[in-house]
Image (spheres, rainbow, N blue to C red):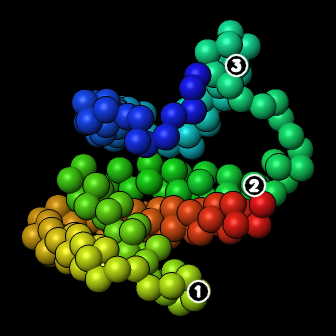
Amino acid sequence: MDNRGDSDASPFLSIFAALSYGIASMAMVFINKAVLMQYSNSMTLLTLQQLATALLIHFGRVAGYIKAQGVNWETARKLLLVSLFYNANVAFALASLKGVNIPMYIAIKRLTPLAVLVAGFFRGKGTPTPQVTLSVLLIAAGCLIAAIGDFSFDLYGYSMAFTSVFFQWRGLVQKMDFHLSR
């Protein structure tokens, strides 16, 4: 696999990548919601998803389809918190899907950039451009407007979704700290 820069990607390839990501992301939410409606044990689903991912990476590496290093215990130790925050994020996200409809779930998850923006400000990471700040604030306002109009409000589902946002934010901050310390 070549490691190409962004300047080498054609506009068609960029659009294809964005559409593929969007389709895969939406499919994942709908599939998880459908499975959770039939099978209520979300922790088992989380474990099976992680096992499938680990096996795909392992067999992809063995077959030569992907380039990945073997297990490095020092890196694994450093990334332990990132992994724990990721697992908590996914666990709470799956739990929230039991009580929150899909559009509201997606809207609430869009609050993560606001959490990153606020945390970056308070941690002294600099101030983003006014355009970025305004964009994030508009997305957050849209989420709040959508929540006000949600007739199927479920406190448990909303609390799980907001807790998921917290752990996603915390994992992202931990990951940024890891990369900055390298």
User: Is residue 157 at all visible to an observer of this figure?
Assistant: no
The residue lying at 35 percent from left, 60 percent from top is: 109
Q: If you read the primary sequence from the N terminus, does the residue marked by circle 3 or circle 2 appear first?
A: 3
Compared with 65, 180 (above or below) is below
Q: Which mark is residue 123?
A: 1
Q: Camera-side residue: 85 or 5?
A: 5
Q: If you read the primary sequence from the N terminus, does the residue marked by circle 1 or circle 2 appear first?
A: 2
- Report helix, strand or loop for mark 3: helix
> In the rendered view, does 154 fall on the left or right side of 45?
left
Percent coordinates x, y for residue 23 in the rendering: 28, 34
Q: CA–CA distance between discs 3 and 1?
A: 38 Å
- Report helix, strand or loop for mark 2: loop
Q: Camera-side residue: 127 or 21?
A: 127
Percent coordinates x, y for residue 176 in the rendering: 62, 65
Q: If you read the primary sequence from the N terminus, does the residue marked by circle 3 or circle 1 appear first?
A: 3
Q: CA–CA distance between discs 3 and 2?
A: 21 Å
The residue lying at 68 percent from left, 9 percent from top is: 63
Q: Tell me the quarter of the picture where residue 69 sits.
A: top right
Q: Give the crowd class for mark 2: few <14, some 14-19, many >=20 residues within 10 Å.
A: some
Q: Which residue is mark 2?
A: 79
Compared with 124, 38 (above or below) is above
Compared with 125, 150 (above or below) is above
Circles 1 and 2, Cβ within 8 Å, touching? The answer is: no
Q: Which residue is mark 3?
A: 61
Percent coordinates x, y for residue 94 in the rendering: 44, 48
Percent coordinates x, y for residue 67 in the rendering: 68, 25
Q: In the image, what residue type sits under mark 3?
A: Arg
